[in-house]
Structures are given as C-alpha cells and as structure tokens.
C-alpha cells in the first residue's frame, strides 16, 4: 500500500513539475513594462519570469497586472486590469537575466489571459527590433504573443512602442485536470484491490 501511495505521489509530482517557455534570449531595448498574451493549451500556473531589469541602484519593484482576453486595445489604461502582485528583487541584478517570483497566475485550458509586467523603480528591458518571429512563442502547454511595451516607471504611462517583445523565459507548472486526478485515484484503488486479492 505504501508503494502505491509513493507511486501516486510520484505521478502527481510529474504532472506538476516546473516547465519553461522560452522567449527572446536577449534584451536590446527598454525600459518600462511589457505586455504578454497567454493562451493555455493545458491548465497552467505561471510561477515566475526570467527577465532583464534596467541598471540602477536600490531594489526594483515589479508589478504584475492581469486581464481576461487579449491586451490589444487595452494598453493605455488600467481599466479592466487587476493588479495581481508586486514583486521585489535586490539591487545587484542589473541588466542580467534575473528570476522574478510573483503569486501564481492560473490559466485554465483553453483560456486567454493577458499579463502586463512593469518595473516601477527600475524598468523591464525587452527585445526591441522584433519581427513576427520574435513576438510569437509556443510549446505543448502555452502560446505567448507579446508585441507592445510602455516606457517609464508608471504602469500604463509613458510612451508605447511596437514591436517590443518579452526577453527571457516564462516559468510555469501544468495543473492536473480534476478528472485526471479522479482517474488516477481510481486506477490506484483498483491496483490496491488486486494486490489484496492476491
């Protein structure tokens, strides 16, 4: 029975292991904030972003805003957006790829969710000479479209530029669907009964 429990835990762990969606590997423009539109193929939780933060002194505050659906046409005002979290990184991360953790952002399979990541003390840097190939990224779990930035330290303020795309990576976990968990539980129960019958 203990081995079955361990097997079940291993299966759950494998379903929720950390995954990465890579965007542009380098930043060549900035700074301010970047808009991202996610389409979930599978249910996921976005856990952190690897991104480039502008050179400066002192810690950097990074805001994460979210809204349901595409961001196109909704980049000049926070109307319809929710401030999901504000993360802080130390003062030593200057113009290098740094990991920024925020409260998990959950996206159900089939849903479209936009995320706006904006540095309010030291801005986010991004890829600034992009073409279509630099604004669309995907893997088996997620599709990412990112083509607009805003400059300055005020979210939704400053000037807007396009195409400007995320530089860095999106870190996430796949969230098992409830029916997957039920099926897994039923399978383990059947295995346990077979073992007892022997």
Image (cartoon, grey):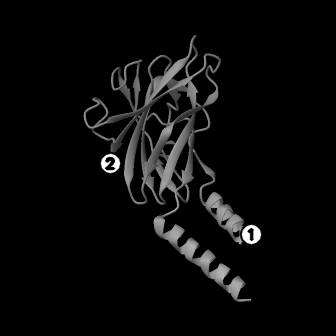
Quick one: 131 or 149, which is closer to the camera?
149
Residue 157 place in picture, x, y as percent: 33, 22
Relative height, residue 198 to residue 184 (above, below): below
Residue 164 shows in the view: yes
Q: Is mark 1 on a helix, strand or loop?
A: helix
**Mark 2 closeness class: few <14, some 14–19, many ≥20 residues within 10 Å:** some
- The residue where tag 1 is placed is 3
Quick one: 94 or 82, which is closer to the camera?
82
* Residue under the image location 44 percent in, 41 percent down: 146
- The residue where tag 2 is placed is 69
Q: Is mark 2 on a helix, strand or loop?
A: loop
CA gap, disc 2 to disc 1?
Answer: 44 Å
* Residue under the image location 53 percent in, 67 percent down: 181
Relative height, residue 154 to residue 103 (above, below): above
Which residue is the extreme one toward the front? 196
* Residue under the image location 47 percent in, 65 percent down: 178
Q: Which of marks 2 and 1 is nearer the N terminus?
A: 1
Residue 3 place in picture, x, y as percent: 74, 69
Instruction: Answer with left or right where residue 138 lies relative to residue 153.
Output: right
């Amino acid at each position: 029975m203990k081995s079955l429990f361990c097997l079940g835990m291993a299966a759950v762990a494998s379903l929720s292991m950390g995954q990465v969606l890579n965007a542009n590997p380098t930043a060549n423009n900035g700074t301010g904030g970047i808009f991202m539109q996610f389409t979930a193929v599978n249910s996921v939780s976005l856990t952190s972003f690897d991104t480039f933060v502008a050179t400066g002194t002192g810690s950097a505050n990074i805001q994460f805003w979210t809204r349901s659906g595409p961001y196109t046409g909704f980049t000049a005002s926070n109307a319809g957006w929710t401030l999901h979290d504000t993360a802080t990184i130390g003062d030593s991360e200057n113009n290098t790829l740094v990991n920024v953790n925020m409260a998990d952002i959950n996206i159900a399979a089939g849903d479209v969710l936009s995320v706006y990541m904006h540095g309010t003390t030291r801005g986010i840097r991004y890829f600034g000479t992009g073409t279509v190939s630099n604004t669309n990224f995907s893997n088996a779990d997620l599709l990412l479209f990112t083509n607009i930035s805003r400059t300055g330290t005020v979210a939704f303020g400053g000037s807007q530029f396009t195409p400007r795309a995320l530089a860095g990576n999106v870190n996430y976990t796949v969230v098992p669907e409830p029916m997957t968990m039920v099926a897994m539980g039923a399978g383990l129960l059947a295995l346990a009964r077979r073992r007892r019958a022997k």
